[in-house]
Image (cartoon, helix red, strand yellow):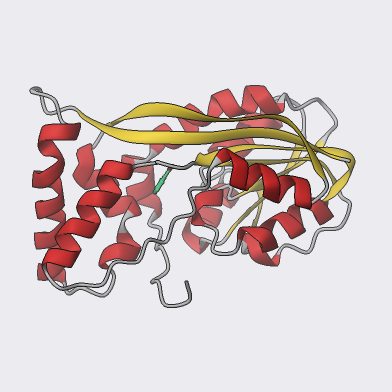
């Protein structure tokens, strides 16, 4: 995966095109059920929207993210947000729970991330989260691959979308007992359309193209998907499939 361009985050674009990510994450917070006095690590905290909710419920939160732009926004909101790549986390037996929403699918080496998560938890600590699972955004990925291939550009997906079996095995090999795990299809309305979504999330696919090529490719992907993901009133819905889990460190 070393030659796949890194995702680039832009805080204003994220706020405009991806606010729904935190809104949907509220359901995952219910699964975490943070308690007053607990210490929670939020892996991939982004701009801190869900870290703030965890704090509001009475827990102390440390958020980590690899995006300087998003960490700056989280800090401005008064959160203890730290610029740390999840692969490099060096916390040791410090947290009652680790939470993660819509972040693990960006991890290039999930084994290393789970090593760090398991190290960060106290015995009996919870690891609860949600991210893209097997089949996630399949239509969008297929259209990106088709359009790029047709034009002779390389296709390399930056995303990790495991099956339940694959991720369960990874959790168990890190000493977790699984309390719940499931793939949940969740068609997701895109408030700024597919183009807003692509501009925010598809950077690694088009990073090596020049501006004109990028605009042409993204317009072609949008045209190709319009009959599938867009209704007659121009409302776009992405074919999200979430992998939701709750596990306890034994
Ligand atoms: C997701 O949340 O499933 C997702 C977001 C951006 C790119 C790919 C997947």
Which quadrant of the frame does ligand 1 lie within? top left
Q: Nearer the viewer, residue 188 or 51?
A: 188
- Counting from the top left corner in percent of width and height, residue 159 is at 44, 56
Q: Nearer the viewer, residue 114 or 85?
A: 114
Point out residue 229 in the picture as x, y percentages from the top left corner.
19, 33
Report the residue at 81% width, 58% height from top.
Answer: 91
- Seen at 86% across and 57% down, the residue is 92
Q: Is residue 78 visible?
A: no
Tell whether 184 sits left or right of 37. Answer: left
Q: Measured from the top left, where is residue 57 in percent x and y?
A: 71, 24
> Could you tell me which residue is drawn at 56 percent across and 23 percent down?
27
Q: Is residue 81 above or below residue 183?
A: below
Q: Position of residue 199 (x, y in %)?
A: 26, 53
Asked if residue 133 can be seen in this view, the reply is: yes
Q: Is residue 150 left or right of residue 41?
A: left
In the rendered view, tell whether residue 94 sits above or below residue 38. below
In the image, 119: left or right of 52? Answer: right
Q: Quadrant of residue 227?
A: top left
Q: Is residue 16 above or below residue 201?
A: above
Q: Nearer the viewer, residue 220 or 81?
A: 220
Residue nearest the viewer, comparing 210 with 181: 181
At x 58%, y 39%, the residue is 164
* The residue positioned farthest toward the right in the image shown: 123
Q: Classify residue 14 as left or right of residue 23.
A: left
């Amino acid at each position: 995966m070393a030659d796949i361009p890194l995702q680039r985050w832009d805080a204003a674009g994220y706020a405009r095109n991806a606010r729904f990510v935190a809104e949907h994450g509220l359901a995952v917070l219910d699964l975490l059920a943070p308690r007053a006095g607990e210490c929670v690590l939020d892996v991939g905290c982004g701009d801190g929207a869900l870290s703030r909710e965890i704090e509001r419920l009475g827990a102390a939160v440390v958020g980590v993210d690899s995006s300087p732009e998003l960490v700056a926004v989280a800090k401005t909101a008064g959160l203890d947000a730290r610029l740390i790549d999840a692969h490099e986390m060096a916390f040791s037996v410090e947290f009652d729970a680790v939470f993660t929403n819509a972040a693990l699918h960006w991890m290039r080496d999930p084994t290393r991330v789970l090593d760090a998560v398991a190290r960060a938890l106290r015995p009996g600590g919870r690891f609860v989260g949600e991210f893209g699972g097997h089949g996630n955004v399949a239509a969008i990925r297929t259209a990106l691959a088709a359009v790029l291939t047709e034009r002779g550009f390389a296709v390399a997906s930056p995303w990790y979308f495991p099956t339940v079996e694959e991720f369960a095995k990874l959790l168990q090999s890190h000493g977790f007992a699984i309390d719940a795990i499931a793939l949940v299809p969740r068609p997701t309305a895109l408030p700024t359309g597919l183009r807003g979504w692509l501009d925010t999330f598809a950077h690694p696919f088009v990073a090596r193209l020049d501006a004109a090529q990028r605009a042409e490719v993204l317009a072609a992907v949008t045209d190709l998907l319009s009959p599938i993901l867009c209704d007659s009133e121009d409302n776009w819905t992405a074919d999200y499939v979430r992998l939701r889990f709750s596990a306890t460190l034994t």
